[in-house]
Image (tube, rainbow, N blue to C red):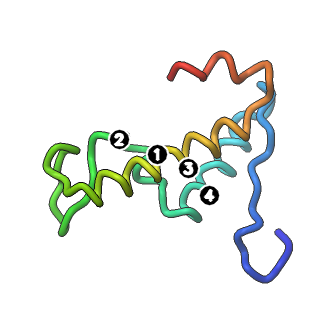
Amino acid sequence: MTGSGGSDLRALIFNGDNYEFWKIRMRTIFKLHGIWDLVEKGLGISESKGKKVDEEGASESEKVSLLMKDAKALGIIQGAVSDDIFPRISNE
């Protein structure tokens, strides 16, 4: 990792080899961006004042924030797989 900001951590491109290493690196990147919980639990759950609520119970700003985090996670994943792998995950 270079630079003083620490946000330069980049995902390696997964091409089907060395999945365990790629998985560890991806988890670290998601934690760095504060979106690991979203990746692990999915879009339907958010945290609101320490209480789990479904998307319908969230305020409009919470929904927008959650959708933005989801888009960020998808972008990171899509940018971290090879062109051969991408079609396999594109509908997930």
What amino acid type is highlighted by mark number 2? Answer: Leu
Location of the N terminus by quadrant is bottom right
- Image location (x, y in percent) of residue 10: 76, 55
Q: Which mark is residue 34?
A: none
Give left or right: position of 4 versus 31: right
Q: Which mark is residue 72?
A: 3
**Mark nearer the N terminus (1 vs 4):** 4
- CB-based contact (under 8 Å), mark 1 and mark 2: yes
- Given residues 88 and 22, the one toward you in this image is 88
Going 77% across and 34% down the picture, which residue do you hit? 14
Give the CA separation, mark 1 to mark 3: 5 Å
89 lies above or below 64 = above
Query: Mark 3 falls on what kind of element?
Result: helix
- Given residues 6 and 21, the one toward you in this image is 6
Going 73% across and 44% down the picture, which residue do you hit? 21
84 lies above or below 19 = above
- CB-based contact (under 8 Å), mark 1 and mark 3: yes
Provide the residue designation for mark 2.
43
Image-quadrant location for residue 51: bottom left
Give the CA separation, mark 2 to mark 4: 19 Å
Provide the residue designation for mark 1.
70
Image-quadrant location for residue 88: top right
**Mark nearer the N terminus (1 vs 2):** 2
Provide the residue designation for mark 4.
28
What amino acid type is highlighted by mark number 1? Answer: Asp
Query: Mark 2 falls on what kind of element?
Result: loop
Give the CA separation, mark 3 to mark 4: 15 Å
